[in-house]
Image: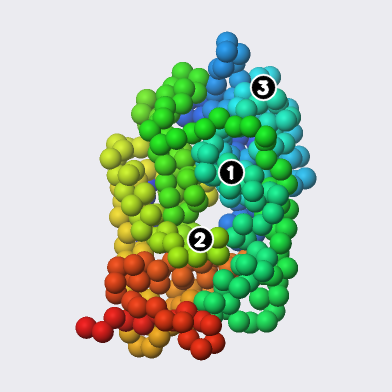
Amino acid sequence: MNALELELDYPFGEALPEPGHTLEVAPGVRWIRMALPFALHHINLWLLADELDGVKGWTVVDCCIASDDAKALWEQIFATQLQGLPILRVLVTHMHPDHVGLAHWLCERWNAPLWMSATDYYAARLGSQSTTGFGGPDAAGFFAAHGLRDPDAVDKIRGRTRYYPSMVPAMPSRFHRLMDGATVRIGAHDWQCISGYGHAPEHIALHCPTLGLLLGGDMMLPRISTNVSVFDIEPESNPLKLFLDSVDRFAVLPPDTLTLPSHGKPFRGLQQRIRQLHEHHRDRLAEVLRACQERPCCGADILPVMFKRPLDLHQTTFAMGEAVAHLHALWFQGLLQRTLDAGGIYRFSAVPG
Protein backbone atom coordinates (compact mmCIF):
# COMPACT_ATOMS: atom_id res chain seq x y z
CA MET A 1 0.00 0.00 0.00
CA ASN A 2 1.05 3.57 -0.59
CA ALA A 3 0.87 6.24 2.12
CA LEU A 4 -2.58 7.42 1.09
CA GLU A 5 -4.00 3.90 1.20
CA LEU A 6 -2.71 3.49 4.74
CA GLU A 7 -5.13 6.26 5.77
CA LEU A 8 -8.04 4.05 4.72
CA ASP A 9 -9.42 0.93 6.39
CA TYR A 10 -9.81 -2.24 4.33
CA PRO A 11 -12.03 -4.51 6.47
CA PHE A 12 -11.53 -7.57 4.23
CA GLY A 13 -7.76 -7.25 4.17
CA GLU A 14 -6.25 -9.06 1.20
CA ALA A 15 -9.32 -11.25 0.62
CA LEU A 16 -10.65 -11.22 -2.95
CA PRO A 17 -13.43 -13.24 -4.55
CA GLU A 18 -12.11 -16.05 -6.71
CA PRO A 19 -12.98 -15.94 -10.43
CA GLY A 20 -16.50 -17.26 -10.93
CA HIS A 21 -17.26 -17.03 -7.20
CA THR A 22 -18.56 -14.35 -4.83
CA LEU A 23 -17.63 -12.97 -1.42
CA GLU A 24 -20.29 -11.67 0.97
CA VAL A 25 -19.52 -8.12 2.17
CA ALA A 26 -22.83 -7.47 3.97
CA PRO A 27 -26.07 -9.41 4.43
CA GLY A 28 -27.45 -10.03 0.95
CA VAL A 29 -24.58 -8.21 -0.79
CA ARG A 30 -22.02 -10.28 -2.70
CA TRP A 31 -18.81 -9.13 -4.40
CA ILE A 32 -17.75 -10.39 -7.86
CA ARG A 33 -14.39 -9.58 -9.44
CA MET A 34 -13.64 -10.00 -13.16
CA ALA A 35 -10.48 -9.39 -15.15
CA LEU A 36 -10.18 -6.66 -17.79
CA PRO A 37 -7.82 -6.72 -20.79
CA PHE A 38 -6.40 -3.24 -20.20
CA ALA A 39 -4.64 -1.20 -17.52
CA LEU A 40 -7.45 -1.14 -14.97
CA HIS A 41 -6.87 -4.92 -14.67
CA HIS A 42 -10.21 -5.76 -13.02
CA ILE A 43 -13.72 -4.58 -12.24
CA ASN A 44 -15.85 -5.21 -9.17
CA LEU A 45 -19.45 -6.23 -9.76
CA TRP A 46 -22.14 -6.77 -7.15
CA LEU A 47 -25.09 -9.04 -6.45
CA LEU A 48 -27.84 -7.67 -4.20
CA ALA A 49 -30.52 -9.95 -2.78
CA ASP A 50 -33.81 -8.71 -4.19
CA GLU A 51 -37.53 -9.39 -4.53
CA LEU A 52 -39.76 -8.05 -7.31
CA ASP A 53 -43.46 -8.75 -7.68
CA GLY A 54 -43.24 -11.46 -5.06
CA VAL A 55 -40.34 -13.23 -6.79
CA LYS A 56 -37.07 -13.61 -4.88
CA GLY A 57 -33.83 -13.21 -6.79
CA TRP A 58 -30.89 -10.89 -7.36
CA THR A 59 -30.09 -7.46 -8.75
CA VAL A 60 -26.79 -7.28 -10.65
CA VAL A 61 -24.85 -4.03 -10.33
CA ASP A 62 -22.59 -3.50 -13.38
CA CYS A 63 -21.71 -6.12 -15.96
CA CYS A 64 -18.11 -6.22 -17.32
CA ILE A 65 -17.20 -5.83 -20.99
CA ALA A 66 -18.73 -8.08 -23.62
CA SER A 67 -16.30 -10.99 -23.94
CA ASP A 68 -16.46 -14.77 -23.98
CA ASP A 69 -14.35 -14.92 -20.82
CA ALA A 70 -16.73 -12.66 -18.91
CA LYS A 71 -19.76 -14.61 -20.13
CA ALA A 72 -18.15 -17.87 -18.98
CA LEU A 73 -17.54 -16.42 -15.51
CA TRP A 74 -21.13 -15.20 -15.33
CA GLU A 75 -22.38 -18.68 -16.30
CA GLN A 76 -20.30 -20.15 -13.48
CA ILE A 77 -21.81 -17.63 -11.07
CA PHE A 78 -25.32 -18.41 -12.30
CA ALA A 79 -24.70 -22.11 -11.70
CA THR A 80 -23.08 -21.88 -8.27
CA GLN A 81 -23.70 -18.53 -6.55
CA LEU A 82 -27.37 -17.59 -7.01
CA GLN A 83 -28.87 -20.18 -4.64
CA GLY A 84 -31.14 -21.27 -7.45
CA LEU A 85 -32.70 -17.81 -7.76
CA PRO A 86 -32.98 -15.67 -10.93
CA ILE A 87 -31.50 -12.34 -11.89
CA LEU A 88 -34.41 -9.90 -11.54
CA ARG A 89 -32.82 -6.71 -12.85
CA VAL A 90 -29.55 -5.27 -14.10
CA LEU A 91 -28.47 -1.95 -12.62
CA VAL A 92 -25.63 -0.04 -14.30
CA THR A 93 -23.77 2.87 -12.68
CA HIS A 94 -22.64 4.43 -15.97
CA MET A 95 -21.96 3.92 -19.67
CA HIS A 96 -18.31 2.92 -19.77
CA PRO A 97 -17.72 -0.47 -21.42
CA ASP A 98 -16.52 -2.34 -18.33
CA HIS A 99 -19.76 -1.41 -16.59
CA VAL A 100 -22.37 -1.78 -19.33
CA GLY A 101 -20.80 -4.10 -21.92
CA LEU A 102 -22.81 -7.22 -21.02
CA ALA A 103 -26.03 -5.45 -20.01
CA HIS A 104 -27.82 -6.48 -23.20
CA TRP A 105 -26.73 -10.12 -22.79
CA LEU A 106 -27.68 -10.26 -19.09
CA CYS A 107 -31.05 -8.62 -19.67
CA GLU A 108 -31.86 -11.05 -22.49
CA ARG A 109 -30.44 -14.04 -20.62
CA TRP A 110 -32.77 -13.45 -17.66
CA ASN A 111 -35.57 -11.40 -19.25
CA ALA A 112 -34.57 -8.72 -16.73
CA PRO A 113 -34.99 -4.93 -17.05
CA LEU A 114 -32.08 -2.50 -17.23
CA TRP A 115 -31.90 0.34 -14.70
CA MET A 116 -29.52 3.28 -15.32
CA SER A 117 -29.51 7.04 -15.81
CA ALA A 118 -31.11 8.33 -19.00
CA THR A 119 -28.04 10.31 -20.07
CA ASP A 120 -25.75 7.31 -19.82
CA TYR A 121 -28.29 4.95 -21.38
CA TYR A 122 -28.59 7.09 -24.49
CA ALA A 123 -24.82 7.67 -24.63
CA ALA A 124 -24.21 3.92 -24.44
CA ARG A 125 -26.88 3.16 -27.02
CA LEU A 126 -25.38 5.70 -29.41
CA GLY A 127 -21.87 4.44 -28.72
CA SER A 128 -22.80 0.84 -29.41
CA GLN A 129 -24.01 1.90 -32.86
CA SER A 130 -21.16 4.28 -33.76
CA THR A 131 -18.27 5.96 -31.97
CA THR A 132 -18.55 8.69 -29.36
CA GLY A 133 -15.34 10.09 -28.04
CA PHE A 134 -13.35 6.84 -28.01
CA GLY A 135 -11.81 6.84 -31.48
CA GLY A 136 -12.22 7.73 -35.13
CA PRO A 137 -11.41 10.85 -37.14
CA ASP A 138 -13.06 13.28 -34.70
CA ALA A 139 -11.07 11.93 -31.76
CA ALA A 140 -7.84 11.98 -33.77
CA GLY A 141 -8.48 15.58 -34.81
CA PHE A 142 -9.29 16.63 -31.25
CA PHE A 143 -6.10 15.14 -29.83
CA ALA A 144 -4.06 16.60 -32.69
CA ALA A 145 -5.46 20.03 -31.85
CA HIS A 146 -4.07 19.53 -28.35
CA GLY A 147 -0.62 18.58 -29.58
CA LEU A 148 -0.73 14.80 -30.07
CA ARG A 149 0.87 14.73 -33.51
CA ASP A 150 2.75 11.41 -33.44
CA PRO A 151 1.71 9.87 -36.79
CA ASP A 152 1.46 6.32 -35.45
CA ALA A 153 -0.70 7.33 -32.48
CA VAL A 154 -2.93 9.54 -34.63
CA ASP A 155 -3.40 6.76 -37.18
CA LYS A 156 -4.31 4.25 -34.49
CA ILE A 157 -6.81 6.62 -32.87
CA ARG A 158 -8.31 7.43 -36.27
CA GLY A 159 -8.68 3.72 -36.95
CA ARG A 160 -10.42 2.92 -33.66
CA THR A 161 -13.91 3.53 -35.02
CA ARG A 162 -15.29 0.32 -33.49
CA TYR A 163 -13.59 0.60 -30.11
CA TYR A 164 -16.73 1.14 -28.01
CA PRO A 165 -18.99 -1.28 -29.94
CA SER A 166 -16.32 -3.99 -29.67
CA MET A 167 -16.97 -4.03 -25.90
CA VAL A 168 -20.61 -2.85 -25.93
CA PRO A 169 -22.06 -4.51 -29.02
CA ALA A 170 -25.69 -3.75 -28.17
CA MET A 171 -27.92 -2.11 -25.58
CA PRO A 172 -31.35 -3.18 -24.33
CA SER A 173 -34.13 -1.45 -26.26
CA ARG A 174 -35.78 -0.14 -23.07
CA PHE A 175 -34.70 0.86 -19.58
CA HIS A 176 -35.89 2.16 -16.21
CA ARG A 177 -34.51 5.60 -15.41
CA LEU A 178 -32.38 6.24 -12.34
CA MET A 179 -32.23 9.86 -11.20
CA ASP A 180 -30.49 11.83 -8.48
CA GLY A 181 -32.44 11.68 -5.23
CA ALA A 182 -34.54 8.67 -6.26
CA THR A 183 -34.91 5.75 -3.86
CA VAL A 184 -34.66 2.21 -5.20
CA ARG A 185 -36.06 -0.59 -3.09
CA ILE A 186 -33.82 -3.63 -3.48
CA GLY A 187 -34.96 -6.56 -1.38
CA ALA A 188 -35.39 -5.42 2.21
CA HIS A 189 -33.46 -2.16 1.83
CA ASP A 190 -33.79 1.29 0.28
CA TRP A 191 -30.89 2.60 -1.80
CA GLN A 192 -30.62 6.33 -2.52
CA CYS A 193 -29.32 7.47 -5.91
CA ILE A 194 -26.52 10.05 -5.95
CA SER A 195 -25.60 11.44 -9.36
CA GLY A 196 -22.02 12.30 -10.24
CA TYR A 197 -20.43 14.15 -13.13
CA GLY A 198 -17.02 14.62 -14.69
CA HIS A 199 -16.18 10.95 -15.19
CA ALA A 200 -19.30 9.94 -17.11
CA PRO A 201 -22.28 11.96 -18.34
CA GLU A 202 -24.58 11.00 -15.42
CA HIS A 203 -23.02 8.43 -13.12
CA ILE A 204 -25.28 6.95 -10.44
CA ALA A 205 -23.89 5.82 -7.09
CA LEU A 206 -26.18 4.22 -4.51
CA HIS A 207 -26.18 4.63 -0.73
CA CYS A 208 -27.98 2.26 1.64
CA PRO A 209 -28.29 3.86 5.11
CA THR A 210 -29.53 0.69 6.84
CA LEU A 211 -26.62 -1.41 5.59
CA GLY A 212 -24.10 1.44 5.85
CA LEU A 213 -22.95 0.85 2.27
CA LEU A 214 -22.07 3.08 -0.67
CA LEU A 215 -21.93 1.52 -4.13
CA GLY A 216 -19.48 4.13 -5.34
CA GLY A 217 -18.98 2.97 -8.94
CA ASP A 218 -16.09 4.89 -10.46
CA MET A 219 -16.74 8.09 -8.53
CA MET A 220 -15.03 6.88 -5.38
CA LEU A 221 -11.99 4.63 -5.87
CA PRO A 222 -9.50 3.90 -3.08
CA ARG A 223 -6.19 3.46 -4.89
CA ILE A 224 -6.32 5.45 -8.12
CA SER A 225 -7.83 8.77 -9.07
CA THR A 226 -10.86 8.41 -11.31
CA ASN A 227 -10.18 9.40 -14.91
CA VAL A 228 -11.58 12.86 -15.60
CA SER A 229 -11.20 13.78 -19.26
CA VAL A 230 -12.16 16.20 -22.00
CA PHE A 231 -13.06 14.36 -25.21
CA ASP A 232 -13.97 15.43 -28.72
CA ILE A 233 -17.72 15.07 -28.25
CA GLU A 234 -17.68 17.91 -25.65
CA PRO A 235 -14.43 19.71 -26.50
CA GLU A 236 -14.73 22.77 -24.24
CA SER A 237 -16.04 21.13 -21.09
CA ASN A 238 -14.80 21.54 -17.53
CA PRO A 239 -15.12 17.99 -16.14
CA LEU A 240 -12.64 18.37 -13.29
CA LYS A 241 -14.82 20.94 -11.53
CA LEU A 242 -17.85 18.72 -12.09
CA PHE A 243 -16.03 15.74 -10.62
CA LEU A 244 -14.73 17.51 -7.50
CA ASP A 245 -18.13 19.08 -6.85
CA SER A 246 -19.67 15.61 -7.22
CA VAL A 247 -17.39 13.79 -4.78
CA ASP A 248 -18.13 16.45 -2.17
CA ARG A 249 -21.72 15.21 -2.17
CA PHE A 250 -20.54 12.01 -0.47
CA ALA A 251 -19.01 13.94 2.44
CA VAL A 252 -22.33 14.03 4.34
CA LEU A 253 -22.54 10.23 4.53
CA PRO A 254 -21.74 8.62 7.89
CA PRO A 255 -17.99 8.23 8.59
CA ASP A 256 -18.33 4.46 9.07
CA THR A 257 -19.83 3.97 5.58
CA LEU A 258 -18.31 0.99 3.78
CA THR A 259 -17.58 2.04 0.20
CA LEU A 260 -17.84 -0.64 -2.48
CA PRO A 261 -15.77 0.69 -5.40
CA SER A 262 -15.70 -0.53 -8.98
CA HIS A 263 -11.91 -0.93 -8.86
CA GLY A 264 -9.83 -1.73 -5.81
CA LYS A 265 -11.03 -3.15 -2.49
CA PRO A 266 -13.97 -2.19 -0.23
CA PHE A 267 -12.86 0.46 2.23
CA ARG A 268 -13.87 2.75 5.08
CA GLY A 269 -12.58 6.29 5.28
CA LEU A 270 -14.84 8.05 2.80
CA GLN A 271 -14.15 11.56 4.10
CA GLN A 272 -10.40 10.93 4.08
CA ARG A 273 -10.61 9.73 0.49
CA ILE A 274 -12.54 12.84 -0.56
CA ARG A 275 -9.81 14.98 1.01
CA GLN A 276 -7.12 12.92 -0.76
CA LEU A 277 -8.79 13.41 -4.13
CA HIS A 278 -8.97 17.17 -3.64
CA GLU A 279 -5.32 17.28 -2.60
CA HIS A 280 -4.28 15.11 -5.54
CA HIS A 281 -5.94 17.36 -8.09
CA ARG A 282 -4.78 20.50 -6.29
CA ASP A 283 -1.20 19.27 -6.66
CA ARG A 284 -1.67 18.32 -10.33
CA LEU A 285 -3.23 21.72 -11.06
CA ALA A 286 -0.27 23.44 -9.41
CA GLU A 287 2.16 21.43 -11.56
CA VAL A 288 0.25 22.27 -14.72
CA LEU A 289 0.07 25.96 -13.81
CA ARG A 290 3.84 26.09 -13.17
CA ALA A 291 4.52 24.45 -16.52
CA CYS A 292 2.33 26.99 -18.31
CA GLN A 293 4.03 29.85 -16.45
CA GLU A 294 7.37 28.71 -17.86
CA ARG A 295 6.12 28.50 -21.46
CA PRO A 296 2.84 28.05 -23.35
CA CYS A 297 1.81 24.39 -23.20
CA CYS A 298 -0.51 22.17 -25.17
CA GLY A 299 -2.12 19.00 -23.83
CA ALA A 300 0.70 16.79 -25.12
CA ASP A 301 3.25 18.98 -23.30
CA ILE A 302 1.42 18.25 -20.03
CA LEU A 303 1.63 14.45 -20.34
CA PRO A 304 5.16 14.17 -18.84
CA VAL A 305 4.21 16.75 -16.21
CA MET A 306 1.27 14.70 -14.91
CA PHE A 307 2.33 11.16 -15.84
CA LYS A 308 5.82 9.97 -14.96
CA ARG A 309 5.53 6.46 -16.44
CA PRO A 310 5.47 5.18 -20.04
CA LEU A 311 1.95 5.10 -21.52
CA ASP A 312 0.50 2.74 -24.10
CA LEU A 313 -2.04 4.02 -26.63
CA HIS A 314 -5.04 3.16 -24.45
CA GLN A 315 -3.48 5.01 -21.53
CA THR A 316 -2.35 7.91 -23.73
CA THR A 317 -5.87 8.72 -24.92
CA PHE A 318 -7.14 8.89 -21.35
CA ALA A 319 -4.02 10.77 -20.19
CA MET A 320 -4.51 13.32 -22.97
CA GLY A 321 -8.12 13.79 -21.93
CA GLU A 322 -7.06 14.28 -18.33
CA ALA A 323 -4.27 16.71 -19.24
CA VAL A 324 -6.73 18.85 -21.18
CA ALA A 325 -9.18 18.62 -18.26
CA HIS A 326 -6.60 20.16 -15.93
CA LEU A 327 -5.72 22.85 -18.47
CA HIS A 328 -9.41 23.64 -18.86
CA ALA A 329 -9.96 23.83 -15.10
CA LEU A 330 -7.26 26.51 -14.84
CA TRP A 331 -8.56 28.21 -17.99
CA PHE A 332 -12.10 28.39 -16.63
CA GLN A 333 -10.71 29.76 -13.35
CA GLY A 334 -9.08 32.58 -15.33
CA LEU A 335 -5.56 31.51 -14.41
CA LEU A 336 -4.65 30.45 -17.96
CA GLN A 337 -5.38 31.93 -21.35
CA ARG A 338 -5.74 29.88 -24.53
CA THR A 339 -4.47 30.67 -28.00
CA LEU A 340 -4.56 28.76 -31.28
CA ASP A 341 -1.13 28.79 -32.89
CA ALA A 342 -0.30 28.82 -36.59
CA GLY A 343 -0.10 25.02 -36.60
CA GLY A 344 -3.64 24.62 -35.31
CA ILE A 345 -2.61 23.61 -31.78
CA TYR A 346 -4.22 25.05 -28.64
CA ARG A 347 -1.65 26.41 -26.21
CA PHE A 348 -2.27 27.61 -22.69
CA SER A 349 -0.19 30.25 -20.91
CA ALA A 350 -0.43 32.01 -17.59
CA VAL A 351 -2.56 35.14 -17.46
CA PRO A 352 -0.23 38.12 -16.87
CA GLY A 353 -0.22 39.29 -13.27
Mark sitting on residue 234: 2
Q: Which amino acid does label 2 sit on?
A: Glu
Determine which quarter of the picture holds residue 211.
top left
Pick out the residue farthest to the top: 54
Marks 2, 3: nearer the viewer: 2
In this image, 117 relative to 251: left or right?
right
Mark sitting on residue 261: none
Q: Position of residue 155 (x, y in %)?
A: 70, 75
User: Of callouts 2 and 3, which one flags the residue occurring earlier in the amino acid sequence?
Assistant: 3
Question: Dot 1 lies on which element?
Answer: helix
Q: Quadrant of the N terminus?
A: bottom left
Residue drawn at x 55%, y 21% is 50
Relative to residue 112, is residue 51 depicted above or below? above
Q: In which quarter of the image is the C terminus?
A: bottom left
The residue tagged 3 is 86
Residue at mark 1 to residue at mark 3: CA–CA distance: 27 Å
Question: Dot 2 lies on which element?
Answer: loop
Q: Which of 138 and 109 is in front in this view?
A: 138
Q: Position of residue 38 (x, y in %)?
A: 64, 59
